[in-house]
Amino acid sequence: MGAIRLLVAETDPATRTLIRQAASEEGFALDEAVDGITAIKLFRRNEYPLILLNMSLPELDGRNVLIQMRKLSDVPIFILCDHATNELCMAGYGLGADDVIRKPFFAPELMARIKVFLHRSGSMLPSPERRVSFKGLYIDTFSHSVYVDEQPVLLTPKEYALLAFLSQNPNRAFPRSILLDEVWGSDFFGSERTVDTHVKSLRNSIKPYDQYLVTVWGYGYKFEA
């Protein structure tokens, strides 16, 4: 499991540096945005367990950033509150913010509050990686997107589910019966050859990386990393 990655959307470089250093000491990674548009782009591209958000952002203010984020996720969001924007920060509670952090703040206390929320949400526990990457083959398990050499590949839902399952269990061979249960469900009554058909189509779609999908003769298939 990689480091827990947080998002901070903050205009003040000194505040970002303080948070970055404190987060690093706790073993957290940090993505940084200096305006609301960048914050939204990072939020849509990545899955964060917690977000720190200043309400006074340029391009798109924190209020609208918060509204957009809450439409898509219930991720914990802490408001970073300047004295000059105290009333706006408090309004963040009504928009779905989970906590308000007033500046200047004590960095260890901020980290302690972050860890409390991460523990409550289970984010401190190991979880599947969002990105599964093998050279030029990239699988995003959050958006269910697949890219070959950075170009998007159109897969059917079952093709994607088959690729995701095998790639998240690399170098392990599975019989067709297990793949049917995992991908199609235990109530599927079709032929095991359905798996062969989907593997063939999948190989064509992910060329030149089709060699990852290996046939185990007389048994089934595996993703050989």
Image (cartoon, grey):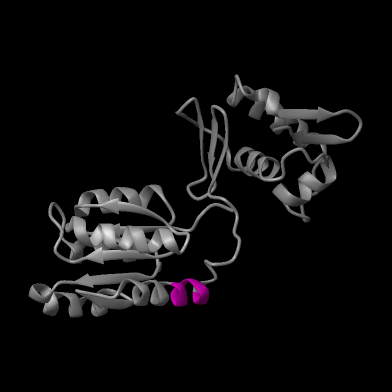
Report the front residue among 35 and 212. Answer: 35
Instruction: Give the percent coordinates (x, y) of residue 204.
Output: 63, 22
- Asked if residue 91 is among those painted magenta in the image, a careful observer would answer no
Q: Is residue 79 above or below residue 27?
A: below
Instruction: Give the percent coordinates (x, y) of residue 24.
Output: 41, 58
Report the magenta residues as a range: 115-120
Q: Report the number of numbered marks.
A: 0
Q: Is residue 163 above or below residue 37?
A: above
Horizontal side of 84 relative to 29 (left or right) equals: left
Q: Main secondary structure of the magenta part?
A: helix
- Asked if residue 116 is among those painted magenta in the image, a careful observer would answer yes
Horizontal side of 204 relative to 57 (left or right) equals: right
Report the front residue among 76 and 220. Answer: 76
Q: Is residue 173 above or below residue 99?
A: above
Horizontal side of 8 relative to 204 (left or right) equals: left
The residue under the point 26% across, 77% down is: 100
Q: Is residue 221 above or below residue 59?
A: above
The quarter in which the C terminus is drawn is top right
The residue under the point 77% across, 51% down is: 181
The residue under the point 37% across, 55% down is: 30
Instruction: Give the percent coordinates (x, y) of residue 149.
Output: 49, 25
Please say whether residue 28 is visible from this viewpoint: yes
The residue under the point 77% across, 44% down is: 179
Residue extending furthest right? 218
